[in-house]
């Protein structure tokens, strides 16, 4: 009987090690995307080959760890970088399905603003600021007063 329990425990440990390894690899891929994106942003250019590589890495990372919230957030940021706001919003909404985070609402606001939808942007920004008042500094200055008012905060 002890052997059966030992084999079962070893099998479970093996599965956990495999899962941890998959998540670790997914996290490393996500970090690589972040590094490449920061380099692109610093250079002020958008390289199609780097962008394509980033999307491939994000797809692989998502396959390895479908619950890694950084993947849809990074995908949304890639689309913002490419000035494709509707695709960015779709990615950020997928991230919200995994976890509600104020910075996701902030980025949805940025995407709406990029698309020329100021009213939707104000709503997203207000929600972000209501959830995390410190984010008011991240809202474009010309919208900040209205966002703070809509968020129900003072000053």
Image (tube, grey):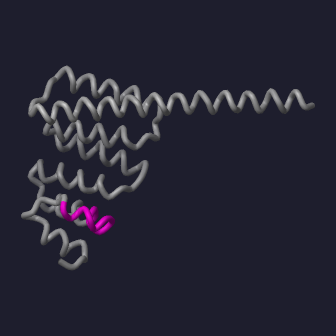
* Residue at x 19% of width, y 72% of height: 148
Q: Find residue 83 and report its image quarter.
A: top left
Write down the region rendered in magenta: 127-137
Q: Residue furthest left?
A: 142
Q: Find residue 90 and report its image quarter.
A: top left
Tell me if residue 95 comes above or below residue 59 in the rendering: below
Q: Does the magenta stretch include residue 130?
A: yes
Measuring from the top left, give residue 38's x and y in whole percent: 21, 35
Q: Residue furthest top?
A: 49
Q: Residue furthest right?
A: 1
Residue 142 shows up from this direction: yes
Q: Which of 133 and 112 is in front in this view?
A: 133
Measuring from the top left, give residue 138's x and y in whole percent: 19, 58
Tell me if residue 150 comes above or below residue 140 in the rendering: below
Quadrant (top left/top right/bottom left/bottom right) for the C terminus: bottom left
* Residue at x 7% of width, y 64% of height: 142
Residue 120 shows up from this direction: no
Measuring from the top left, give residue 125's x and y in whole percent: 22, 61
* Residue at x 34% of width, y 40% of height: 72
Q: Nearer the viewer, residue 19 or 85?
A: 19
* Residue at x 23% of width, y 52% of height: 108
Q: Is residue 68 magenta?
A: no
């Amino acid at each position: 009987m002890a052997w059966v329990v030992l084999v079962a425990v070893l099998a479970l440990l093996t599965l956990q090690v495999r899962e941890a390894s998959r998540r670790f690899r997914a996290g490393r891929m996500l970090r690589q995307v972040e590094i490449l994106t920061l380099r692109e942003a610093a250079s002020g250019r958008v390289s199609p080959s780097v962008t394509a590589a980033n999307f491939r890495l994000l797809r692989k990372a998502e396959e390895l760890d479908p619950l890694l919230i950084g993947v849809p957030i990074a995908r949304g940021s890639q689309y913002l970088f490419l000035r494709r706001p509707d695709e960015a919003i779709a990615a950020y909404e997928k991230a919200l399905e995994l976890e509600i985070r104020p910075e996701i609402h902030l980025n949805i606001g940025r995407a709406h603003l990029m698309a020329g939808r100021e009213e939707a942007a104000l709503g997203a920004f207000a929600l972000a600021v209501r959830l995390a008042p410190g984010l008011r500094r991240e809202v474009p200055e010309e919208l900040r007063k209205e966002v703070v008012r809509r968020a129900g905060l003072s000053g």
